[in-house]
Image (spheres, grey):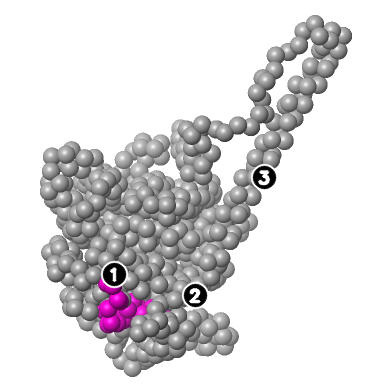
Amino acid sequence: MNGILIACLILLPMLASPLVYPLRRSSRAWRNRFVRTLPLIELACAVALILFPDAQLTLPGVCGLGLHFAAGSLRTLLTVTACFLWAMTGLNSPAYFAHAEGCNRYYCFWLLTQGALMGVFLAADLFTLFVFFEMMSFTSYVWVVQNETEEALRAGETYLAVAVIGGMTLLVGLLLLQDLFGTLEISRLRALAEALPAERRTQLYVAGGCCLVGFGAKAGMFPLHIWLPKAHPVAPAPASALLSGILTKSGVFGVLIISRYLFWADLPWNTVVLALGVVTMVLGAVLAVFSIDLKRTLACSSMSQIGFILVGVAMQGYLSGENALAAWGTVLHMLNHSLIKLVLFVSAGVIYVSTHSLNLNDLRGWGRNKPWLKGVFFVGAASIAGVPGFSGYVSKTLLHESIVEYIHLLEHEGLSTAAFQTVEWLFLISGGLTAAYMTKLFVAIFVSPRASGQHLGLREYMSRETSVALALGAAALLVMGLTPGITMEPLAEQAGTFLLADHGHAVHYFTWVNLKGACISLAIGAAVYLLVIRRLLMRRVGSEMEYLNRWPDWLDLENLVYRPVLRGLAFVGAFGARVVSSVGDLMVLIGEKILFTRAPGIFVPKHDENFGIYARKPRRSIVGDTFSFDLMLAGGGLVLLLLYLLL
């Protein structure tokens, strides 16, 4: 029974995915029932898996090394969370795609991605995790390019580039770990890493760095975050909810494994993770403050919240054997962020379907007379801003308290606390920026006067199934936020065993000591909204206020750094290939001169008269020169390399 549940979670959506095509030919209604029902079956299997915390499944010989799966602790929590998000977006998707064509392709890859993600979260070794991680990257690419607009195709190109480069780097790290330990079984890594001789630590750092790049790319960690603000706005809203809510957690899951099992209390490693987490946290929040696109703001917000989680990952290492608060905060913020982004992105989808715009100037005042949507959006916004009484406050309080606890430890030992006091203030400021940009969104859409020329829209602007999905997500955020000791702490303690956390102690969330941090962040948020957003990022045009995008267009890391570097590498490669080719041509020329020195004109070797002539290429051959074609070849090369290594 144990293995059957794991097999169903992974294989059922994959095997069932092609059925969307014949079902659609029969009836759109049958297809819609199918995509609503199958994720509910998956959710039931995931909940049943809670009863079997020691469940395992091994598929020997698959991919050469075999595939190994295990359940329990954090694995089961992430599996249940992912299945819940799929079930809720399954309820919402038919309404979102009601008037769209070509959504069979989306549904097919939507189900394939669910099976692949189940394989990631239930993997018992890093090789199994890698196989499904790469599968998930390629199947979710279709979500990004689903609308086939110019922006979607370019964002898909970026997403695929980051996925391929990150995947190759991750593979290098795993090969180095395999060479170090002779195994990639997660449960054995910590003991093997602690017993590693000092002279081989350098290789461990190189392997860990490669893995951090691979997993961090999927998580949206700086400086590999470039795909996230571009993919979310162009993807369908249900896909954005999953990309932001749970697919980024697959990358965080990998970072957690590497950090907790290879670098338990390693100071240099945790310093790097902390620095990357702080930059990701602050930069994402700043980008969200400047954005005037609804889904881009939510995407940048996801980047910032991933930074909060990475800070928690690092604090677990600093606190070592007393890391319960950091571990609980990390786990709970992963859970909270998933549910929050379900509510916010599905709400954004409802708004987009009615208005066909994501610009705040077009959406201004649209939701004034929609109390239900206003209520659930407020729950999501208050949760992510860390307002007491909502679930986000609990996880952010735990993360903040872990920083404070480490500062106290440093003071007790007589060491400098300046660096971590700076981290604490950046944490609180980032929380304030979160409150500021969520206030901007809420006021613009649900409070401001209606924009001139805006259509009132249909009276029934939201389907019943979408209302159910939003209600369940918002209710979970409220219930967990009001009863953290009953609901959230048991989940955190159970999941924390995977992170090697201690038992911790009871936390009184609503005492002044803990409320103070939230109040400081909310005060900073109010100041930023009133003094920065209202005064600098808005202007009055006639009788209306207009939101301004003052972020410089040229300040784009992808266009400023990555694409020029890739073009430079392509030029260097082409130049090198041309040089090598010219050496061959030179040898042929020398050979001709030597062979035909005494018999000129008697025998002349045949030449291609058209060699080197430039002409317009046929349209079909241009495909072979595109960046996407290069990435496809790189992916094919990766597959061949895997087969070579496995065989």
Q: Is residue 267 visible?
A: yes
Q: Which mark is residue 344?
A: 1
Q: CA distance from mark 2 to mark 3?
A: 36 Å
Residue 72, percent across and down? 28, 59
Residue 129, percent across and down? 39, 50
Quarter where residue 404 is shown: bottom left
Is 551 contained in the magenta span? no
Q: Is residue 313 visible?
A: no
Q: Which mark is residue 18?
A: none
Mark 1 or mark 3, which has the lower sequence index? Answer: 1
Give the residue displayed 69% in from the left and 35% down from the top: 578
Give the residue displayed 20% in from the left and 68% down from the top: 457
Predominant secondary structure in magenta? helix
Q: Which residues are magenta?
A: 433-454
Q: CA distance from mark 1 to mark 3?
A: 45 Å
Q: Which residue is mark 3?
A: 572
Q: Dot 1 lies on which element?
A: helix
Is 445 contained in the magenta span? yes
Is residue 607 depicted above or below 451 in this figure? above
Residue 647, percent across and down? 46, 32
